[in-house]
Image (cartoon, rainbow, N blue to C red):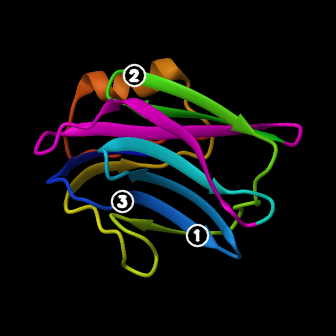
C-alpha cells in the first residue's frame, strides 16, 4: 500500500493508513518527530514499531510513503518506503491482520488524523518490488490508480 501525503505537522502521531480489527494492527504513521513508521501488534497484543525511517518528513511538502510485506514461514518481512529511501524490518511476533478494516488519514475511530492531504492511494494484492515502488515515486503525483494482480 502507498500514498502521496502532505502534512502540516503536529506534536502527536498522525496516521496515513491504519488497518485494524480483531486485536490486530498494521499501520503506516508519522510520529511526533515527523519520521515515517510501520507498526503491527505483536503476538501478545502489544504495540510493535517494526520500522522507523531515519529520514524526517518535510512538512508542507508532498512525500511518498509505502510499505510492502511478505511471509517467510512464520516471519513477517516488511519494507518501508519514504520518497527514494527504503528501510527493512522483520518479526516472528505479530497478530494475523487478515480481514482487518483500513482507514485512510487516521485510525478507524477517527483519531490521530494526518492534518494534511492524501493523494494517489494504491493497494496491491501482491508485494511490489523495490523497483516498482521507485517507479511510482519517480513518476510523481497525479490522480491515477494502478493495479498489479498476482497470477
Look at mark 3 in the image and give the residue it sits on: 13
| Residue at 37% over, 39% down | 65
Q: Is the residue 130 above or below the residue 140 in the image?
A: above
| Residue at 57% over, 38% down | 68
Near mark 1 (Cα within 10 A), the count class, few <14, some 14-19 or many ≥20, is: many
Q: Nearer the viewer, residue 1 or 25?
A: 25
* Image coords of residue 144 (percent x, y): 27, 44
Look at mark 1 in the image and give the residue it sits on: 20
Counting residues from the N terminus, which is met first, the one under dot 1 or under dot 3? 3
Whether the residues at callouts 2 and 3 have beta carbons within 8 Å, the answer is no
Q: Nearer the viewer, residue 82 or 120?
A: 82
Near mark 2 (Cα within 10 A), the count class, few <14, some 14-19 or many ≥20, is: some
Secondary structure type for disc 3: loop
Real-space Cα distance between discs 1 and 3?
16 Å
- In-image side of 46 versus 114 (left or right): right
Q: Is residue 110 visible?
A: yes
Real-space Cα distance between discs 1 and 2?
26 Å
Q: Quadrant of residue 139?
A: top left
The extreme left residue here reads 60
Residues in magenta, as a range: 45-74
Q: Is the residue 42 above or below the residue 149 in the image?
A: below
Real-space Cα distance between discs 2 and 3?
21 Å
Q: Quadrant of residue 22?
A: bottom right
Provide the major secondary structure of the magenta segment.
Answer: strand
Amino acid at each position: 500500500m502507498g500514498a502521496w501525503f502532505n502534512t502540516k505537522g503536529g506534536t502527536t502521531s498522525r496516521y496515513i493508513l491504519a488497518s485494524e480489527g480483531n486485536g490486530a494492527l498494521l499501520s503506516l504513521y508519522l510520529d511526533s518527530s515527523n519520521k515515517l513508521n510501520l507498526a503491527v501488534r505483536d503476538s501478545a497484543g502489544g504495540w510493535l514499531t517494526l520500522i522507523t525511517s531515519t529520514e524526517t518528513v518535510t512538512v508542507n511538502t508532498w512525500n511518498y510513503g509505502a510499505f510492502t510485506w511478505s511471509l517467510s514461514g512464520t516471519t513477517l518481512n516488511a519494507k518501508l518506503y519514504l520518497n527514494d529511501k527504503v528501510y527493512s524490518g522483520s518479526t516472528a511476533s505479530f497478530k494475523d491482520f487478515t480481514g482487518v478494516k483500513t482507514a485512510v488519514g487516521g485510525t478507524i475511530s477517527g483519531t490521530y488524523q494526518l492534518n494534511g492531504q492524501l493523494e494517489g492511494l494504491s493497494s496491491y494484492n501482491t508485494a511490489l518490488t523495490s523497483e516498482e515502488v521507485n517507479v511510482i515515486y519517480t513518476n510523481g503525483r497525479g490522480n491515477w490508480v494502478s493495479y498489479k494482480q498476482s497470477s
